[in-house]
Amino acid sequence: MTPYELIHFLKAHLIEQGMSQALATYINVIVVLLALAGFLFVLDWLIKKSIIRLFTLFADSTTSTFDDFLIESNFPRYVSHFIPLLITFFFIQELFLDFPRIVPHLLTAIGIYAIILGALVCRSVLRSVGNFLFTKEQFKDKPLDSYIQVLMMFVWIIAFLFTVYRVTGYSVTSLATFGAASALLLLVFKDTILGLIASIQITINDIVRIGDWITFTKYGADGTVIQINLSSVRVQNFDNTYTTIPTYSLISDSFQNWRGMQDSAGRRIKKAIYIKQNSVKFLTPEQIESFKKIELISAYVNSQQQKVDAYNQEKDVDKSLALNGRNQTNLGVFRKYVDSYLNGHSAVLKSEFLMVRYLAPTPKGIPVEIYCFSADKQWANYEYIQAEILDHIIAAVSYFDLEIYEYPSSQDFSADS
């Protein structure tokens, strides 16, 4: 029995039983169509299970993870749909032989489905390639998502053009069609094109990598970059919230990237305490003797005082007034103490720049700033080291007859009254 006779067997039988040809034709089409749909559904399920099983066995027998990513992205599932599609394509013309006007429309629908299925297969492959490359050390911090999305965009554009050709019959290569499509694409994909340009510049100039800590005040972002794609950059903030930043903003706006600190030997500590100006005084002989007991600056105070005394004797300075000649001050000795303390601190990096300096006086007093680098860059440890240094310096101020400025509180006013 030929395929035609098999498909139209019911029709011929119904006509033999006295049914009209038109009604027999409709009943035959409906019955055969339902039978074909059921057959294709079962066939598609069996093929899908078989292909997925074969892929899984193959993936388990190989050391590469690429085939595992293919399974995760449904590549075997999409491929399995092509076989039922081909069977439908070959049988549809025979099934609707009595309805020649419907056949072209059905073939067009099958063609469109095949185009979409092909695009889904390409998307699955591209996603698998991206996920596979992310497992490689040299690609972990690269914005691969942007390039995968660009390729995927071209796949969908080609699928759209072929769909238009399938429906209308217009050539996808004609100049008019290309010009109209270009204008439409520029309008629709403006942000995507800007994102593509930004992604290329970010990669070439190495502006941002996945894993970088960035601070972008404009968008409230302060955390680690976890994803870079065509349209946005996703940042996981330190409070475990997420901030999405337009990709183009990374080259059009200003932000802070902490990678330089993370790659350097240490992390900077830059803090200042404010000393009340009226607490700064020349040292008396009693104070000098007292400061010589402080181990960190004992040698400094002693040698500095010898230089001061030698100068004053040489110039025959009248020391009945402390202002005359050279003198040591409690603030100067305190600054030397802080410098010695930092140089002796085990957590302060000695190979990096270290300095204790005065900033310009302010209404709040004289800022004494410490500028050094912590050897430990981990945030929690860094904050601990910084706090430990400030704790010691603040507690040491009173030993030098100095006072730290702070705004008066309600208790201060109560005490005055």
Image (cartoon, rainbow, N blue to C red):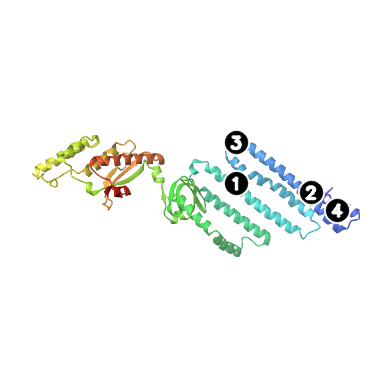
On screen, residue 159 versus residue 225, left or right, reads right
- Left or right of 52 in this view: 413: left
Query: Closer to us: mark 2 or mark 1?
Result: 2
Report how far apart the C-alphas of labels 2 and 4 lie in the structure: 14 Å
Q: Position of residue 184 (x, y in %)?
A: 57, 62
Callout 2–callout 3 Cβ contact below 8 Å: no
Q: Secondary structure at mark 3?
A: loop
| Rendering quarter of residue 351 | top left
- Mark closest to the chain's N terminus, 1 or 3: 3
* Number of the label disc, if any, that sits on residue 125: 1
Marks 1 and 4: in contact by CB < 8 Å?
Answer: no
Is 270 on the left or on the right of 310, as rendered?
right
Q: Earlier in the sequence, mark 3 or mark 4?
A: 4
Q: CA distance from mark 1 to mark 3?
A: 18 Å
Mark 1 element type: helix
> Which amino acid lies under the numbered mark 2 shown in the image of this protein?
Ala
At x 28% / y 44%, what residue is drawn? Answer: 355
Judging depth in this view, the residue of 324 and 128 nearest the camera is 324
The label nearer to you, 2 versus 4, is 2
